[in-house]
Amino acid sequence: MSEETRGDNETSDQAPVSSSLNRRQFLAGGASLLAVSASAALSGVQAEERSEAIDPMHVPGALPRPYGERSPFEKQTRLAAGTSSTTPLQDLQGIITPSALHFERHHNGVPAIDPTRHRLLIHGLVDRPMIFTLEELLRFPSASRIAFIECSGNSRDGWGETHDSTVQALHGLTSTSEWTGVNLTTLLGTAHMQPEATWLLAEGNDAAALARSVPLTDEVLNEAMVCYGQNGEALRPEQGYPLRLLLPGFEGNINVKWLRRLKLGSAPFMTRWETAKYTDLMPDGKAYQFSLVMDAKSVITRPSGQQQLLPDFHEIQGLAWSGRGRITAVEVSVDAGRTWQTARLQEPVLPKCHTRFRLPWKWDGQETIIQSRCTDVTGYQQPTRESLIKIRGTQSSYHYNGIQSWKIERNGLVKNVYV
Amino acid sequence: MSEETRGDNETSDQAPVSSSLNRRQFLAGGASLLAVSASAALSGVQAEERSEAIDPMHVPGALPRPYGERSPFEKQTRLAAGTSSTTPLQDLQGIITPSALHFERHHNGVPAIDPTRHRLLIHGLVDRPMIFTLEELLRFPSASRIAFIECSGNSRDGWGETHDSTVQALHGLTSTSEWTGVNLTTLLGTAHMQPEATWLLAEGNDAAALARSVPLTDEVLNEAMVCYGQNGEALRPEQGYPLRLLLPGFEGNINVKWLRRLKLGSAPFMTRWETAKYTDLMPDGKAYQFSLVMDAKSVITRPSGQQQLLPDFHEIQGLAWSGRGRITAVEVSVDAGRTWQTARLQEPVLPKCHTRFRLPWKWDGQETIIQSRCTDVTGYQQPTRESLIKIRGTQSSYHYNGIQSWKIERNGLVKNVYV
């Protein structure tokens, strides 16, 4: 039988009506029994559509656009707090963060840079100081990598008293992009770095002139990139347009944005960004400097703080990441940590990259606490808040990676709690 | 020595001057000798910046934005031609296509759909016809996958006479996104698909009511998804907001956008989109129907048509993809096909996904022709235009995947040619 769609006398307008299925069990991916909540009966839906809205099938649609935009019905936004803004983790799909929703952190605003005027200087302990235009950098051998960047101050509220909040406000200073640029070693080779060079000063072209000292470890030499691309196009202004440093796994601020200068030296440069800021105060009053790597962390993004649940089937979802490499496992507890189940990880699982985990779950309407904990390729397991505080105290501002606990109240409200 | 950046008496403003390095050879990634062209002398650059523009370090930057935009200096756009628009492949980085630059193809415009009113009907050979709201679909177990979609008419100019054009105009109807949604089998299981069901009609909610018949092969049942997410956020309107079918590896149009209806049947539905359109006319006058898989193709995107080269070092870059699985190799010829070199593939190499390849190259200023050819996991190698035409003739409109040849003229202009 042929079916000419518009002429079909059996289109959905006349289709045999179903439906209204309450909590019917179905097999999801061969893994778990889930249910779907009731659908409106067909006739009701159709009546509603006909009476109240223009049927998009009855009017020609929009013509092609040179540069697309999201649907006006979509409202997710970053949430600004002073000089930063957070990614709406509760709304994200997959592992790529839309560039428009990548978190921001700047110390004197986002500079407006003309790329034709921008230059990168490489000097210090090099035989041949160099200045590069962006056009020149674009002609070097290139590389791309999907990696997270996380502000070292992400999740910092964890050091203090618990308070009702969203996953975006608590943990939204982390995002993942596909970054493209030139391997740092290519540029250092071009400038003929001297053997004594063991540290690198990276300076931004913003009004804060943010500058950080980068130790030239094997890891840095193997992985660091000077990037001009993000998710297929040029870096966004908030992420360093037209040039940034990428140090996969290292705290966000050292991935210096609006990069203008790399100076080779034989010791850390002790900028105020690594003395007055971005150090970790320990219980004995001493402070760690250059604790650069972001340790493994995970967080359940759905359901999460201030969301409202119905007793029903839910897919628990979240993100896990580690500055030390690949995530090897994420476990989820739905009973306040008494038992743990292994979550499914979205492939490909990439090193130093957000990894989405998923676990089907039926909430029975009873009060409970849900948590996630991840393990990375080094065997390191994300600590409880208690064990983290035991070592680090509560005077730190940075590098909080304790397990996040969400309490589901009997009324379905999800709350940030400590256990 | 400490370096307080703004107070440092050795910032770049006073840095020991380099420079002006002409074609210095350097080691790129341990692989190839490349050179970088001359940089302006430092003093000149600085003078220029001071006299003609506001130094972004001297004015506070912009505050956080709820939803970011690209820099006003960036101008890459899709190129519209009637009811389609092409991705600027020559400008892309990495493998992710920015959603705003994902190619478009629609048959009566892009519909404006209110997601709260949108419904998906599943009916036909099912025990339980179902209607889903978007909210309900969002609560199903989800999956994400990075995959290309290519219009079957991409590269169609290859069937005709050669003409001067860009890679965007010739091959830009292909893009890659991270797609998120529900596995098709999950929904078919919910509707209790009957054993006799072997085909699926998928219909869009656009004014063309585009509808295609999908064979329910193992591959389709294993891989098809009903998607609501693209690159971390909701689908863009041009890509099917709020819901589309994803059939990784299949020609674009059958990945039905604005998806409103799935009807199970026991034979193809023979819509006009698979009878009057989207068939492949062979030399003997017969036409193939349902040639759905996009065979392996590659194209060099830089340097490419209408670009202008200088005799210098260049990184040849391009994209390769196959609807049958992973790309296993891309070879590049810089001598009109006499010899071939293996290009480097950007990791991760994902099945049915754009794969970026890169090969360093020094153009000596002589006229030549550059080409790429790829091999996929099945062992299939991209054919020459000659061998493709020999079998398919020149009456087809779709599924052209012959090797693209770019001629570099002595003046450096890059032209589309047949060899």
Image (spheres, coloured by chain):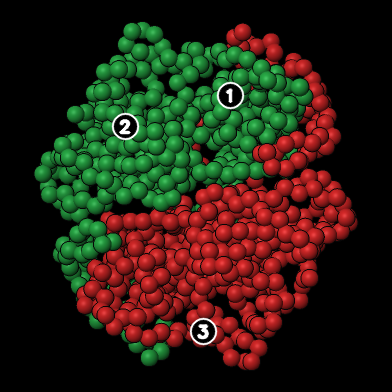
Chain colours: A red, B green
Task: Indicate whether A160 appears above or below B388.
Answer: below
Callout 2: residue from which chain?
Answer: B
> Image quarter for residue A335?
bottom right
Asked if labels 1 and 2 share a chain, the reply is yes
Q: Position of residue A212 (x, y in %)?
A: 44, 78
Q: Amino acid at mark 1?
A: Leu
Q: Nearer the viewer, mark 3 or mark 1?
A: 1
Mark 1 surroundings: few (<14), some (14-19) or many (≥20) residues within 10 A: some
Q: Residue under circle 3?
A: A289
Amino acid type, residue under disc 3 in the picture = Gln
Residue B216: assigned label:
1
Does residue A374 sit above or below B268 in this rendering? below
Spot occupied by residue B334 in the image (x, y as percentages of width and height):
19, 42
User: Mark 1, chain letter?
Assistant: B
Task: Tell me the element at label 1.
Answer: loop
Q: Is residue B54 visible?
A: no
Residue drawn at x 63%, y 73% is: A400
Q: Which residue is mark 2?
A: B382
Q: Residue at 39%, 29% (x, y): give it.
A: B295
User: Which quadrant of the figure contains the N terminus of chain B?
Assistant: bottom left
Above or below, comparing residue A272 to residue A137 in the picture: below
What is the quadrant of residue A379 in the picture?
A: bottom right
Neighbor class of circle 3 (other Cα within 10 Å; few <14, some 14-19, many 20+) is: some
* CA gap, disc 1 and disc 2: 27 Å
